[in-house]
Image: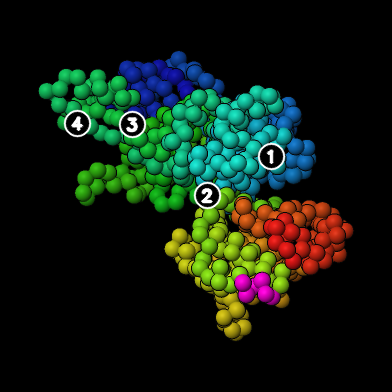
Amino acid sequence: MAILNATLPLLPSGFADALTAIPGVRLRGQRATVPWHAVPVVDRLLRSVGISATGTAWAQSPPTTATWTEAREALVATSAAKEFVLEGFLTGYQRDALGFALRRPGALLHHPTGAGKTVSAILWALAGGGPTVIVTRATTRGQFSREVARFTYYEAFPLKPAQEVRKRDRWQSLDDYIRWCGEAGQPPWVVVGWESLSLHLNTLIALQPASLVLDESHKGKSNKRWEVIPLSDDDPGAAAGIKARGGFVRPNEDGSLVGILPRDNLATATATLSKVARRRLATTATPISDRVRDLWGQLDLLEPGAWGSFSVWARRYADAKPGQYGGLDTSGISNPEELVERLDYVVHRVDHATTHAQLPAKRRESLYISPADQCDASAGFTREQKAAASRGASALLELKLAEAASRKRKAVLARIADHVESGHKVTVFTGRRRDCDELASSIRGAVRKATVWSAHGEHSQTERDSIKADYMAHPGGCVLVGTGEAWGTAVDGLQCTDAAFFAMLPYTPGQLTQWEGRFTRLGQSRPVVIYYCIAEGTVDEHVADILIGKIANVDRVADSGSLAGAGDALAGLDDPEAIVDSIMAKLGIGV
């Protein structure tokens, strides 16, 4: 971190307090240390009273922003970035973000949901070399690991609790993976869930990560890292005990001594890991999910100590004042212009309009959901299976796909919420009507301010047309949940969608063409990302292997990006009956 050391003359009465009220500024006697983004603030304060600092020198020079050419050279030097990523794959703002973050010891990418923050973070870590730790949601550990393999020649290890390890997993433990890295000649890349970071903290520290990626960094926003313990004069050994447990002692406002102990929680664990890493990158679409106070925890993870303690920061930027029931009320905002000025040093911002202007019209993403992250299927499938079998293989396959779709409700909620909170319009196609209503209800509970519609075959065409009109006219974040059967064909009006989730997978080229065609058609007003939600260990994996995995080949021969006439690329699987037979055979079911 860039720190400016400066010697100050004798200061006027009370001026030292004014200096140390600037978060991150430290004053010992006449010697001041100033974080690089606070230098303009301190300079203005000194000039206001006619004071000039002497003997100024950078303890570490401020980082500069790299050009894309320089960032690309760093990636090429690793020999691990896949060629297509370096040749026209990235958008302009992604290249700018890489240049911005490359040399900074800590940076935050504040980009909208769906803007491609994952690939930016992966390439940033790759360019830095050495071991990498990626912290993300538990439900996206596997997905992030797949993205590492997609964009680089490295393999990442999703760190899971022992009970979630499956026999077919490539590595049964982190030790197995570390040994493989030594044999393969690549540095370790470990992906861990926010939810289990504290559990694995010592293991991650032992890796001595060169790069730390904090995906969805608002998960680490908490400022409650320390516990205050009053010390008694009757216990002279109490202070030594506090220090032995990693804490420290300081005087309270009334002159008594208090012990400050680190809490055993996620915020403390993340801060501990952050101090070990050489460089840090945070990514989020919502750095402020509630109040401006949300920023301090994330900024302190990126530049430990550079933003002062939370109490000093909150008094400066969150208008902190005594709370009605004790403590501090930090729900306000103060000195916003100064805060924004300092944030510009470490935050790379991209707005919605910029991403919309640069993203392709359609992007596809396979969203894998591990068995541990799946919920129980909704009721009724066992009873319906016998009836479906009597109607033939297609009916049985559709039932199994619907059952797999019902297991994804919990896992897709967080991703849907991210899009809605970014102001996006979201459509979800699922299987059964019951699942449609249950998923819509869950979304309403998770994103309380969002408008959510549920519509399927039990709704009349008039009702569905009315819901579609409301969805089209809605100005902000909203969600339409429907069955693929009711909404996947012959519907015009969903081309205003930002994100589409196929909770139930289409299993023929015709279905896939129709479902995607609801969003990419004449009148499309914005880029759309289409998520194929794949429940591991279910029929979904066979559908993905046979059909979805061949989409790239299909697009090479299809007209205008559709899938029509792509039988050759699908290796003879353009016949729906052949696809059904192939999938059922993989499931070991005779047809």
- Magenta region, residue range: 386-391
User: Which is nearer the N-term, disc 4 or disc 2?
Assistant: 4
* Viewer-proximal residue among 302 and 240: 240
**Coordinates of residue 376 in the picture (x, y in percent):** 50, 59
Q: Amino acid at mark 3?
A: Pro
Q: Which mark is residue 372?
A: 2
Q: Which residue is mark 3?
A: 262
User: Which is nearer the N-term, disc 3 or disc 1?
Assistant: 1
Q: Amino acid at mark 4?
A: Pro
Q: Which mark is residue 230?
A: 4
Whether 109 is drawn above or below 560: the answer is above
Q: Is residue 22 visible?
A: no
Q: Which residue is mark 1?
A: 149
Q: Is residue 51 visible?
A: yes
Whether 331 is drawn above or below 103: the answer is below
Callout 2 environment at 10 Å: few (<14), some (14 to 19), or many (20+)? some
**Which of labels 1 and 2 is toward the front?**
2
User: Which is nearer the N-term, disc 2 or disc 3?
Assistant: 3
Disc 3 versus disc 1: distance between alpha carbons?
A: 37 Å
Disc 4 versus disc 2: distance between alpha carbons?
A: 43 Å
- Position of residue 454 in the picture relative to residue 558 (left or right): left
**Coordinates of residue 422 in the picture (x, y in percent):** 54, 56
Toward the left, the furthest residue is 234
Residue at disc 4, secondary structure: strand
Res 408 quadrant in image: bottom right
**Coordinates of residue 39 in the picture (x, y in percent):** 46, 29
* Viewer-proximal residue among 423 and 312: 423
